[in-house]
Image (cartoon, rainbow, N blue to C red):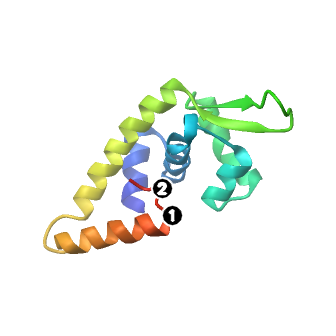
Amino acid sequence: MRRFDARLSGLHGVSLADFTMLLRLGRASGGRMRRVDLAEALGLTASGVTRGLAPLERIGLVTREPDARDARVAYAALTPTGRERLREMLATAEETAADLFTGPTWADEDVALLAALLTRLDGGAVG
């Protein structure tokens, strides 16, 4: 966790928690989610999501979109800049994972098993 956080922070100016939020938005239909659904998906409170999204909105990676049919509903959506930066962050995360899970400590079968278990744990959203 610390290696991912340090690499993402050093190269992209975001934390691992920020990256996780952006990744979840990036994998959502249309690159956007209702804030309440994002909170549920991440295991956070609605206020926790609001606090997490605020800095991402300030730097232009995420925007708030109202629902045209219900003014009480707000969506968090990736901006075009957010989509591009997310692709860069994902490459960094993949490089970091490759660095961590190569070498004599991790057999290929172990890495495959870990990937399968993490995918199953996340309900199939990873990948």
For the residue carrying disc 2, how many other residues have a C-alpha within 10 Å: few (<14), some (14-19), or many (20+)? few
> Where does the N terminus fall, quadrant-wise?
bottom left
**Which numbered tag is attached to residue 68?**
none
Q: Tell me where residue 114 sits by quadrant.
A: bottom left
At x 46% / y 39%, what residue is drawn? 13
Q: Is residue 7 left or right of residue 101?
A: right
- Say which residue label 2 marks: 125
- Say which residue label 1 marks: 123
Q: Is residue 27 left or right of residue 54?
A: left
Residue at disc 2, secondary structure = loop
Count of numbered circles on the image: 2
Q: Is residue 122 visible?
A: yes
> Horizontal and vertical percent for residue 7?
36, 49
Q: Is residue 104 above or below residue 6?
A: below
> Horizontal and vertical percent for residue 12?
42, 38
At x 51% / y 63%, what residue is drawn? 123
For the residue carrying disc 1, how many other residues have a C-alpha within 10 Å: few (<14), some (14-19), or many (20+)? few
Mark 2 and mark 1 in contact? Answer it, CB < 8 Å. Answer: yes
Q: Is residue 50 visible?
A: no
Q: Amino acid at mark 1?
A: Gly
Q: Amino acid at mark 2?
A: Ala
Q: Is residue 30 left or right of residue 103?
A: right
At x 42% / y 64%, what residue is drawn? 119
Residue at disc 1, secondary structure = loop
Q: Front-most of 49 and 40? A: 40
At x 69% / y 51%, what residue is drawn? 37
Cα gap from disc 2 to disc 1, whole angstroms: 6 Å
> Horizontal and vertical percent for residue 11?
37, 40
